[in-house]
Amino acid sequence: MSLSCLYCKDADVDNIYEWHDRLVQHLHDSAKSAEHLRVTKRNKKNKKSAYEIFQLPCQHEAKRAAGNCQLTSELAKPRREAIKEDLKERQVAVLANAAEARESLYKARWDFANLPPGDINILLNSKIVFNAPYDDKHTYHIKITNSSARRVVWAIKTTNMRRLGVAPACSVLNPKQSTLIAVSCDVFIYGREDTNNDCITVEWCNIPDGAEKQFRREWFQEDGMMSRRTCPLNTILEQTHTHF
């Protein structure tokens, strides 16, 4: 056998070994790829199962909570009905008490309005006299005393509010209480104004029991009994003296 033939046979053997090595490497790589793919799929499956396992208690809790809410609502229904009935009864009681209070107040006002007011004493002459000259302000003092056994409210009006003044003009008097009032006449030119009808009017009436000692105009607007006394005012040129 020649050397060339031996060389060819050795080359073929080397090629076979190389192909064998390549085949083994390929099979090894394929096996690794298949194993990697299998592991990846298994991990994905495991992840999905873990998520489902985690969600399972949450879903169970949600269902149980919904059931508890429904059960709680059913158990609380009688309680709500009882509360509604109690509120209705309280509302009826409050309305009844309010109606009774209004009726009692109306009756008290009716009794108060139809009770004649007590008498008051006004210490003055039959007339209040202002003497000339009238270039200065003149003041005349009168005393009002509540001689009754009830509290009264009083107010004084004048026929000429610009020229004639009263201080204080209104107040409340307890039984047997007195107050001093200043009736004044401002400066004016005698003869240029009509002074013939000058007067002051004292009005008074009872005030409800328990009311505060504070003047209220609406007490004079009630449909009750009121007393009134008018005191004439005289303005004269001669100097005269007023006697009590």
Image: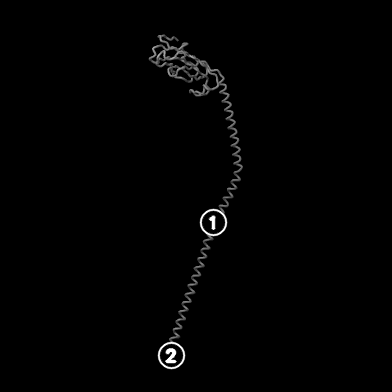
Q: Residue furthest left?
A: 135
Q: Which residue is mark 2?
A: 2
Quadrant holding the C terminus: top left
Q: Residue at x 49, y 70 (%)?
A: 33
Q: Is residue 79 left or right of residue 156?
A: right
Residue 64 in picture, x, y percent from top left:
58, 51
**Callout 2: 10 Å neighbours few (<14), some, many (20+)?**
few
Q: Is residue 244 left or right of residue 64?
A: left
The residues bearing labels 1 and 2 have C-alpha atoms spaced at a distance of 80 Å
Q: Secondary structure at mark 1?
A: helix
Q: Which residue is mark 1?
A: 55
Q: Residue at x 51, y 63 (%)?
A: 44
N-terminal of the pair, mark 1 or mark 2, is 2
Q: Is residue 201 above or below residue 52?
A: above
Front residue (pair 196, 93): 196
Which numbered circle lies on residue 213? none
Quarter assignment of residue 237:
top left
Q: Is residue 23 above or below residue 221?
A: below
Front residue (pair 223, 206): 223
Residue 157 in picture, x, y percent from top left:
47, 18
Q: Residue at x 54, y 56 (%)?
A: 55
> Identity of the amino acid at label 1?
Gln
Front residue (pair 39, 191): 191
> Identity of the amino acid at label 2?
Ser
Residue 97 in picture, x, y percent from top left:
58, 30
Q: Is residue 131 above or below residue 206?
A: above
Q: Residue furthest bottom?
A: 1
Q: Secondary structure at mark 2?
A: loop
**Disc 1 and disc 2 in contact, CB within 8 angstroms:** no
Residue 74 in picture, x, y percent from top left:
61, 45
**Callout 1: 10 Å neighbours few (<14), some, many (20+)?**
few
Quadrant holding the N terminus: bottom left
